[in-house]
């Protein structure tokens, strides 16, 4: 499990609230305190390596180093979210459909930017996880999922 301070720093970075130098500073501060308690684990080591790579990269390589850093930060956040948030396969498929229907109608948006970001992140997470939407049988799979949910209450 990643330290909460590191996870929160990764979330702020992914939202665009902080820069890479800010993330580096927050990570090092959290790492110093954490290292007194236990060794760093996989995702923390990966973030350390990604930050070091960014620091040592030349200017032309910075964009790819930032994208790699975003991927590592997302892994840290996703790993935590997988532990605290779960839905059934049927619920995931129906949520995917609702969010994509909204997107097709002009985008997933609310008056609150944070809500829009959260809905877009949920949509992206479902899209990267589900295989059913890419199946020729998707309409039937969706109908079956809806029927199972409708009768489960």
Image (spheres, helix red, strand yellow):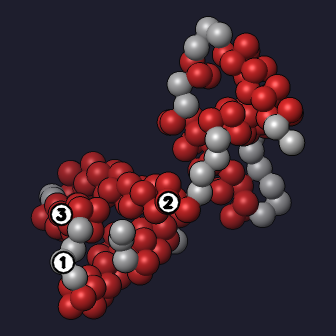
How many tags in the picture? 3
Image side of residue 5 versus residue 132, left or right: left
Quadrant of the snapshot with the N terminus: bottom left
x and y percent of residue 67 in the render? 34, 51
Query: Which tag, 1 or 3, sits closer to the chain's start?
Result: 1
69 over 145 or under it: above or below: below
What residue is shown with label 1?
Answer: 39
Write the residue at 36% across / 51% down: 71
x and y percent of residue 56 in the render? 13, 64
Q: Which mark's residue is nearer the viewer, 3 or 2? A: 2
21 over 69 or under it: above or below: below
- Could you say which is closer to the camera, residue 119 or residue 135? 135
Query: Which tag, 3 or 2, sits closer to the chain's start?
Result: 3
The CA span between labels 3 and 2 is 24 Å
Q: Which mark's residue is nearer the viewer, 1 or 3? A: 1
x and y percent of residue 65 in the render? 25, 54
What residue is shown with label 3?
Answer: 49
Evaluate whether residue 25 shows in this view: no
Q: Residue furthest front?
A: 152
Q: Which structural element holds mark 2?
A: helix
* Residue 91, image quadrant: top right
Q: Give the numbered dot on residue 83.
A: 2
């Amino acid at each position: 499990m990643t330290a909460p301070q590191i996870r929160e720093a990764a979330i702020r970075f992914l939202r665009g609230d902080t820069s890479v130098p800010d993330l580096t500073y927050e990570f090092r501060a959290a790492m110093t305190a954490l290292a007194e308690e236990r060794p760093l684990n996989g995702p923390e080591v990966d973030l350390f390596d990604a930050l070091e790579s960014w620091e040592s990269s030349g200017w032309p390589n910075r964009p790819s180093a930032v994208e790699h850093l975003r991927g590592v930060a997302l892994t840290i956040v996703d790993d935590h979210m997988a532990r605290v948030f779960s839905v059934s396969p049927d619920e995931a498929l129906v949520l995917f459909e609702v969010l994509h229907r909204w997107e097709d109608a002009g985008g997933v948006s609310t008056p609150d930017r944070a809500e829009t970001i959260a809905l877009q992140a949920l949509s992206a997470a479902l899209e990267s996880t589900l295989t059913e939407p890419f199946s020729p049988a998707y309409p039937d799979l969706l109908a079956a999922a809806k029927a199972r949910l409708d009768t489960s209450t």
